[in-house]
Image: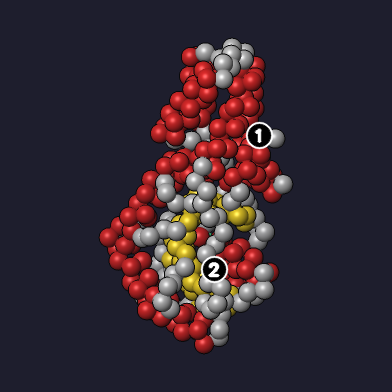
Amino acid sequence: DKFKDGLSKSRKSFAERMNNLVKRYRKVDEDFFDELEELLIESDVGMTTVMDLVDRLKNESRTRNIKDTNMLKDVIVEVLSEFLTKHKEETRLNLNPSGLTVILMVGVNGAGKTTTIGKLAGRLKNEGKSVLLAAADTFRAGAIDQLQVWGDRTGVDVIKHQEGSDPASVVFDAMQAAKSRKIDVLLCDTAGRLQNKVNLMKELEKIKRVISRECPGAPHEVLLVLDATTGQNALSQAKLFRQASEVTGIVLTKLDGTAKGGIVLAIRNELDIPVKLVGLGEQLNDLQTFDADAFVYGLFS
Ligand code: GDP
């Protein structure tokens, strides 16, 4: 139901337009496929994925001898689900069963990193885990205070230095604190300066070195936070971050704020990184583990 609520804008736009298309055409032909293609592109599914999808649908309609658009609609739902689930990836977070888990959050400013860390801290605490936050976005004005607000809200301590200080040294202190307090999960915020790719890469490398030196095997997750409302930009950001760091999972935020939920399909089809979490609102409970079936259901019903 959370998915259904969160996807209401996408559902309105996508499902309604598709229903109209189906009614208007009745017969499956080239024009129908052209318009379907356009609808998918406008829903941010992304050109490569749209081509794959439409090819697949054309094939299915031919082999199954489907001439009626209404019947093809079921196949569309089926094929979309298949695209979303074809990589049977692990969407659960990789948590260390014994000892400290370190999760590094990366992504451009405004994508929703801090908010996601807050939500995740709340969720992990609810599961009975002890959590600590590292305010290693020392670059963006207000980032440290904003993380502290989430720390207060969830009752989780924040390790922080002054704005402008070395993020790796914040992370070093946080690692010491996490180890001495026997914390279960340390969540590290980072700065998202994509303007300077070399610096970003160096900074992330340095942070990761500190983490793995202090805790072999860590970080257990590097989660890339992407804003779903930025559409194809999110996709190109993902490609850049993938070069800068080894991303283990994607958090797609603000799905509630876009009518173009199709971006999930593009991400799943064009990147080899699983979508692990999705943000469906600004509140503490608006973070969900990604579930492809619930997603398709939320989009169509
Ligand atoms: P950061 O710069 O990456 O740390 O981004 P923030 O966490 O500060 O988020 C930027 C804005 O996006 C804030 O106003 C958040 O409340 C909002 N936001 C984050 N996640 C979501 C989401 O899933 N849905 C909605 N509607 N807003 C979100």
Which residue is the site of mark 1?
Answer: 300
Q: Is residue 209 left or right of residue 126?
A: left
Mark 1–mark 2 distance (CA, rounded to whole Å): 33 Å
- Label 2 amino acid? Leu
Is 85 in front, or is 2?
A: 85
Is 279 in front, or is 153?
A: 279
Which residue is the site of mark 2?
Answer: 95
Q: Residues within 10 Å of mark 1 (few under 14, many from 20)?
A: some
Is 280 drawn above or below residue 19 in the view shown? below
Name the secondary structure under disc 2: loop
Is 97 drawn above or below residue 286 in the view shown? below
Q: Residue at x 65, y 19 (%)?
A: 70
Residue positioned most to the front: 63
x%, y% of residue 68?
Answer: 62, 15
- Label 1 amino acid? Phe
Q: Residue at x 43, y 29 (%)?
A: 51
Q: Residue at x 63, y 52 (%)?
A: 281
Residue 222 visible in rendering? yes
Image-quadrant location for residue 115: bottom right
Residue 20 visible in rendering? no
